[in-house]
Image (cartoon, rainbow, N blue to C red):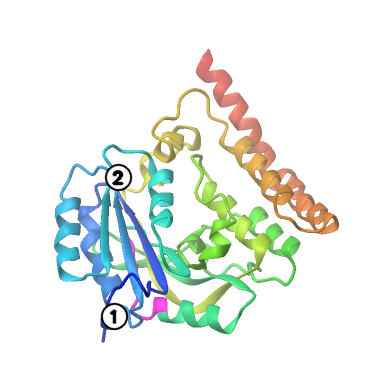
């Protein structure tokens, strides 16, 4: 049974804020909202930020807001890019905990309850996340998400060990849709206007504390043709999806390298621990990224010729 909505008041904000950035999401939005409102843990608000949709998204959000007072709607006058819309939901949040919700994904009923319980029981954790299953347009399970069984140590004891795992593994970044402590999020750069900024965001969290995975597969991740990664396969061309004002050459892997180094230097960790973290960045370049860094250069040289 879904939890009843507690009364909303200015004096007592909800414990958890759910940020729902959406653009032209009417096809899957109802399933997403139904799964949110069907959670067994109900002390939350939904901050829906409509990035100037041109389909029926606005009307659908209004209908659900009339049904449940926990839903708050904000609409942009123009499409500002995905990064700005994601961050807008966080800027409006009031809870001590926060979670981004993708408008095409579905949560199993106990997702929030189990993630919140994990954070409550582990004070040194900054994020709790769940395993995920890929589903198709009709909600049928296709498979486990590709890294679901990888032995990633995002919950390692030291910042350097966590950072190494978050940087060097080619992981899905599905943990970005976990439940996060709001103060820890405020110490990150959130979602930047560049490809791969979700990786930087998770790495910045890992520098602060442990990322713990609960045992169940409670996130149903929608795999469909309209996802940005499917519509725009090339990372350099996908930059405009994150930042609608992006112009000129794009060097996404060089930007990611720069952001990793910036995150370590801004972490406030002791010098020895920062050095170990930077060694992780060097391993990332050596093991995997050097080809991608060269690819950025060659792509932009070819595009000029």
**Does 226 lie within the magenta span?**
no
Q: Position of residue 275 (x, y in %)?
A: 82, 52
**Residue at image coords 65%, 35%:** 293
Q: Where is residue 209 in the image (x, y as percent from the top left)?
A: 65, 68
Indicate which disc residue 6 carries: 1
- Residue 38 vertical position relative to residue 59 in the rendered view, above or below: below
- Judged from this view, the residue extending furthest toward the right is 272
**Residue at image coords 68%, 60%:** 207
Residue under label 2, please give it.
51
Q: Nearer the viewer, residue 28 or 120?
A: 120
Which stretch appears magenta? 105-112
Query: The residue tagged with tag 1: helix, strand or loop?
Result: loop
**Residue at image coords 53%, 29%:** 250
**Does 106 lie within the magenta span?**
yes
**Residue at image coords 51%, 44%:** 192
Q: Is residue 3 visible?
A: yes
Q: In what quadrant of the picture does the N terminus appear?
A: bottom left
Q: Nearer the viewer, residue 144 or 182?
A: 182
- Judged from this view, the residue extending furthest toward the front is 11
Which of the 4 quarters of the picture holds residue 203? bottom right
Q: Can residue 107 be seen in this view?
A: no
């Amino acid at each position: 049974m879904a939890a009843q909505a507690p009364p909303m008041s200015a004096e007592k904000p909800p414990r958890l804020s759910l940020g729902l950035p959406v653009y032209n999401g009417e096809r899957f939005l109802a399933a997403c909202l139904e799964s949110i409102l069907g959670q067994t843990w109900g002390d939350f608000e939904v901050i829906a930020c409509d990035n100037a949709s041109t389909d029926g998204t606005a009307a659908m959000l209004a209908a659900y807001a009339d049904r449940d007072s926990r839903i708050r709607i904000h609409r942009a006058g123009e499409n500002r890019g995905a990064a700005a819309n994601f961050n807008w939901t966080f800027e409006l949040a009031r809870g001590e905990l926060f979670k981004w919700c993708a408008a095409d994904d579905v949560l199993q009923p106990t997702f929030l309850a189990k993630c919140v319980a994990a954070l409550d029981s582990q004070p040194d954790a900054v994020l709790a996340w769940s395993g995920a299953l890929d589903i198709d347009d009709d909600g049928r399970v296709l498979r486990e998400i590709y890294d679901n069984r990888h032995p990633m140590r995002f919950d390692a004891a030291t910042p350097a060990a966590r950072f190494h795992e978050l940087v060097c593994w080619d992981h899905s970044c599905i943990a970005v849709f976990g439940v996060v402590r709001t103060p820890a999020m405020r110490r990150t750069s959130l979602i930047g206007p560049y490809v791969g900024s979700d990786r930087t965001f998770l790495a910045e969290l890992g520098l602060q504390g442990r990322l713990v995975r609960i045992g169940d597969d409670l996130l149903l991740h929608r795999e469909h043709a309209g996802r940005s990664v499917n519509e725009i396969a090339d990372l350099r061309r996908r930059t405009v999806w994150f930042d609608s004002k992006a112009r000129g050459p794009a060097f996404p892997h060089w930007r990611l390298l720069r952001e990793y180094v910036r995150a370590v230097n801004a972490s406030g960790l002791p010098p020895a621990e920062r050095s170990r973290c930077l060694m992780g960045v060097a391993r990332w370049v050596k093991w995997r990224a050097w080809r991608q860094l060269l690819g950025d250069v060659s792509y932009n040289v070819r595009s000029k010729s």
